Image (tube, helix red, strand yellow):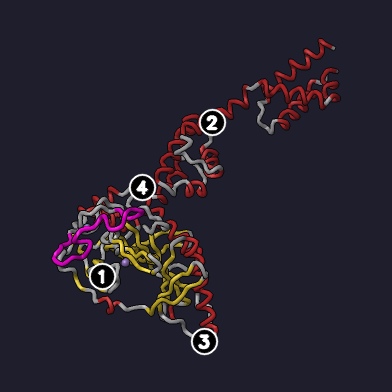
């Protein structure tokens, strides 16, 4: 009998696969393009797994994987290699995937979140598989294979089981996506499958089981599936049963996870070193060079925005999600600084009005803000209407003023300020009021 206890808190780790947007595939010269194009148009003997073909690693894909690892504060392993991971599936023509086993490119990183550090167990490089298309042709259910995706560089990122809720997991995955997009190495589009996510979920580490959830192709599903799974496991545990170690798939129609298979163990994959690719070695100098080339990352930029432009943290974080947008934001902040406009106000405007600076250029935005400020001071036509209304609405005050109680004008100024929502310039109002009251004097 298993008792549900306090220490059975949700323990969640994720595995993320992202397709790199290199020009060519991982081990051949085929064009790396597979979304919404004619099936089986970008293939060759290597990515079709034909006998006698030999893989040649894509250097850029290796560098980009190292960059992801470094951005996630991982250690680059100076010695690394590719391995064969064997399993049979129709989308895998060689019946093995070239992946990495015991010597991945990067290990031991972390990512800061609002709930603390989340450990990055490993970052490794492998090849994507082909894609199965389930169709109905001439009244028959058929499965077709498209090998355009076969051999596309795929980075796998595995986290430590440091996440404790569905919301935390979703936020973490979104942050991870933002960083990888920022590096410009992947589109990380969940809908198009260039970012794919699996979650390992259990209630309490000490029970020694975990359930892997697959088919999470949107951030909303990540949250829903984990919530469903935690509930399911809690019910089992309440009945004194230990959940089975298995792989379950998220069914978005029925809104539940369903058992797919009992998890294979590593031994089932019969990993061994890829004999056709020599092991990789990296010099410390090379790694240092890559670190130097790393761009300023979202968190760093947010901190700098906060300090350099005195904008609040909340704004700084929201304005550093996308690299392009953040660069335009900085341009706007610099212009604001030059024009003596409060930068936090500009930042707030961009955030709250969801201003897309690639459409409204920073120069335009600042011009608009300036114009609004100018209107406040010199649009006399607008001001005179409020001045006349104030005079009309407050005959008693006007009477007092004309009787020589000059301080009464302050009341009229106050009224105009109120009518203009505080935007009118009190100096000009005073001037206009005095003129008006004098001229009315003459006419009466
Ligand atoms: Zn190819
Ligand atoms: Mn993988």
Residue 382 in the figure: left or right of residue 366:
right
Q: What number is the disc on residue 296?
A: 4
**Which mark is drawn over residue 240?**
3
Dot 2 falls on a residue whose secondary structure is helix
Residue 103, picture quadrant: bottom left
- Looking at the image, residue 11 sits to the left or right of residue 403; the answer is left
Instruction: Name the N-terminal-most of marks 2 and 4.
Output: 4
Q: CA distance from mark 2 to mark 3?
A: 65 Å
Separation of disc 4 and disc 3 at Cα? Answer: 51 Å
Task: Quote the CA–CA distance across marks 2 and 4.
Answer: 30 Å
Instruction: Establish whether ligand 2 lies closer than 8 Å to the Cβ of label 3.
Output: no
Which label was assigned to residue 368?
A: 2
The residue indicated by pointer 1 is: 101
Q: Nearer the viewer, residue 41 or 271?
A: 41
Magenta stretch: give its range: 33-55
Q: Is mark 4 within 8 Å of ligand 2?
A: no
Q: Nearer the viewer, residue 39 or 64?
A: 39
- Tell me the CA gap for discs 1 and 3: 36 Å
Percent coordinates x, y for residue 145 in the rendering: 31, 64
Q: Looking at the image, is 163 positioned above or below residue 23?
A: below
Residue 394, percent from left and from top: 82, 26
**Quarter of the figure with the C terminus:** top right
> What distance separates the C-alpha of mark 4 from that of mark 1?
31 Å
Query: Crowding at label 1, few (<14), some or many (≥20) Cα neighbours within 10 Å?
Result: many
Name the residue rendered at 78%, 28% in the picture.
Answer: 411
The numbered mark, 1 or 3, whose residue comes first in the sequence reads 1
* Residue depicted at 25% across the width and 55% down the height: 42
Residue at image x 15%, y 65%?
Answer: 276
Of labels 2 and 4, the one closer to you: 2
* Numbered disc 3: secondary structure: loop
Task: Name the mark nearer the viewer: 4 or 3.
Answer: 3
């Amino acid at each position: 009998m298993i008792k549900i206890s306090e220490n059975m808190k949700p323990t969640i780790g994720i595995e993320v696969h992202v397709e790199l947007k290199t020009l060519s595939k991982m081990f051949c010269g085929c064009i790396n393009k597979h979304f919404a194009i004619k099936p089986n148009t970008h293939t060759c003997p290597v990515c079709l797994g034909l006998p006698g073909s030999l893989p040649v690693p894509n250097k850029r894909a290796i560098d980009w994987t190292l960059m992801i690892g470094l951005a996630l504060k991982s250690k680059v392993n100076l010695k690394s290699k590719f391995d064969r991971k064997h399993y049979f599936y129709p989308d895998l023509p060689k019946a093995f995937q070239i992946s990495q086993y015991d010597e991945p490119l990067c290990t031991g990183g972390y990512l800061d979140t609002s709930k603390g550090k989340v450990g990055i167990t490993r970052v490794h490089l492998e090849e994507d598989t082909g894609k199965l298309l389930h169709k109905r042709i001439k009244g028959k259910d058929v499965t077709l294979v498209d090998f355009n995706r076969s051999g596309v560089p795929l980075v796998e990122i595995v986290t430590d089981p440091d996440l404790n809720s569905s919301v935390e997991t979703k936020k973490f995955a979104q942050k991870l996506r933002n960083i990888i997009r920022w590096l410009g190495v992947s589109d990380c589009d969940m809908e198009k499958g260039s970012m794919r996510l699996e979650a390992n979920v259990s209630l309490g580490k000490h029970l020694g089981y975990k359930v892997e959830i697959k088919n999470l192709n949107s951030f909303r599903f990540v949250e829903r599936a984990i919530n469903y799974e935690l509930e399911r496991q809690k019910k089992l545990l309440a009945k004194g049963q230990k959940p089975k170690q298995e792989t379950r798939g998220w069914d978005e129609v029925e809104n539940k996870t369903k058992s797919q298979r009992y998890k294979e163990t590593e031994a089932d994959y019969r990993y061994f070193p890829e004999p056709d690719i020599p092991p990789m070695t990296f010099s410390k100098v090379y790694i240092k060079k890559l670190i130097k080339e790393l761009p300023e990352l979202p968190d760093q930029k947010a901190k700098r925005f906060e300090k350099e432009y005195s904008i609040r943290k909340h704004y700084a974080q929201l304005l550093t999600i996308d690299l392009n947008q953040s660069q335009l934001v900085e341009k706007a902040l610099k212009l604001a600084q030059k024009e003596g406009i409060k930068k936090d106000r500009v930042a707030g405007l961009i955030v709250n009005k969801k201003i897309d600076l690639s459409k409204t250029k920073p120069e335009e935005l600042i011009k608009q803000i300036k114009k609004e400020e100018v209107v406040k001071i010199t649009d006399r036509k607008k001001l005179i209407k409020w001045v006349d209304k104030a005079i009309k609405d407050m005959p008693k005050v006007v009477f007092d003023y004309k009787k020589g109680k000059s301080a009464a004008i302050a009341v009229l100024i106050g009224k105009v300020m109120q009518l203009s929502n505080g935007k009118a310039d009190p100096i000009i109002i005073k001037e206009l009021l005095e003129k008006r009251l004098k001229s009315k004097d003459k006419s009466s």
